[in-house]
Amino acid sequence: MAGDNQIVLDKSSIAQKWSATRWRQLVGRAVTVSYQTFNQKGQPVTVARVLTVAGIVDSTSEVGLNAVNYTTMQSMRSAARVSTQPTFVSVRIKSRVQNQVVVNEINHLSINGKHPFAATSIAATLDSFNTYVNIATKVLAAIAGISLIVSALMIIVTMFMSVSARMREIGILRSLGERRRDIRRLFTSEALMLGIISATLATGLSYLAERGLNHGLAKLTGGYALVQIQLSNVIAIFIIAIVIAWLAAILPARRAARANPIKALAAE
């Protein structure tokens, strides 16, 4: 426990960054502690003081916890001419159902005709966060929709080029007794395979991106996986990819099936 004009440092976030091997030698040393705050006029003020390291703790927090006692903190703020009065209070409600009711009652509290209190809840914060997430999701969905249209056009162009390049092959197959439906199925199945391979590659890259983003944001989210790919999303991606590939192959496959066998054999 830190005494007056003392501080307890966090091992991982402070002590080991000073020295990976000699961090224990910080105990008993004087360190300068400073942080930014605002005065009563809303102007930024730096609160600073030289404190003695009373000890080092290994906290479980991702951001690290350094501790000073209330008397030291109050003295530091007074010396910097910063108010020591509390600026907020936390209210714990037994029933989550009454969250918004309590928030509204606090916001409507009146002192001398004024409303000095402004209350918010974790639920309201989460609602705001979800709103931004939904907006981002819709924007990404719109971009994905445009990408799907472009992908469909690319498949159509690729299949038409494939039909033109393989016209002689089509003529040989027709001369060997292959029916129009067989030719149509040939190009349709190739398009479906293209869709399945594309969906597989996209899914693999998405899982790699998910792991990379969650690893990068682990310190901010406390280890919570912010980006999550659900199995239902993967199934939907495969279905959409297969359907788009099939639709994009209809016209090229129809052209290949309707090709004149004699003209196709003469094609170069």
Image (cartoon, helix red, strand yellow):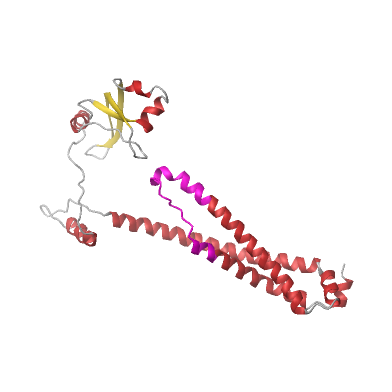
Span of residues in magenta: 209-236
How many circles with numbers are drawn on the protein? Answer: 0
Q: Is residue 40 left or right of residue 11?
A: left
On the image, the x and y values in percent for residue 52 come to 27, 23
Q: For the point 59% across and 57% down, which residue is it?
A: 202
Residue 151: name its quadrant.
bottom right
In the image, residue 52 above or below residue 100: above
User: For residue 118: magenta?
Assistant: no
Residue 243: name its quadrant.
bottom right
In the image, residue 5 above or below residue 172: above
Q: Which quadrant would the C terminus be assigned to in this image? A: bottom right
Judging depth in this view, the residue of 8 and 265 nearest the camera is 8
On the image, the x and y values in percent for residue 65 come to 31, 35
Judging depth in this view, the residue of 51 and 226 nearest the camera is 226
Question: Does residue 192 appear in the picture of this structure?
Answer: yes
Q: For the point 31% across and 24% down, which residue is it?
A: 32
On the image, the x and y values in percent for residue 129 come to 37, 55
Judging depth in this view, the residue of 68 and 229 nearest the camera is 229
- Our reading of the magenta stretch's main secondary structure is helix
User: For residue 225: magenta?
Assistant: yes
Q: Which quadrant would the N terminus be assigned to in this image? A: top left
Q: Is residue 244 left or right of residue 215?
A: right
- Can you name the residue that lies furthest to the right here? 266
Q: Is residue 262 left or right of residue 81?
A: right
Question: Does residue 156 appear in the picture of this structure?
Answer: no
On the image, the x and y values in percent for residue 231 come to 50, 61
- Can you name the residue that lies furthest to the left here? 112
Q: Is residue 112 left or right of residue 266?
A: left
Residue 54: name its quadrant.
top left
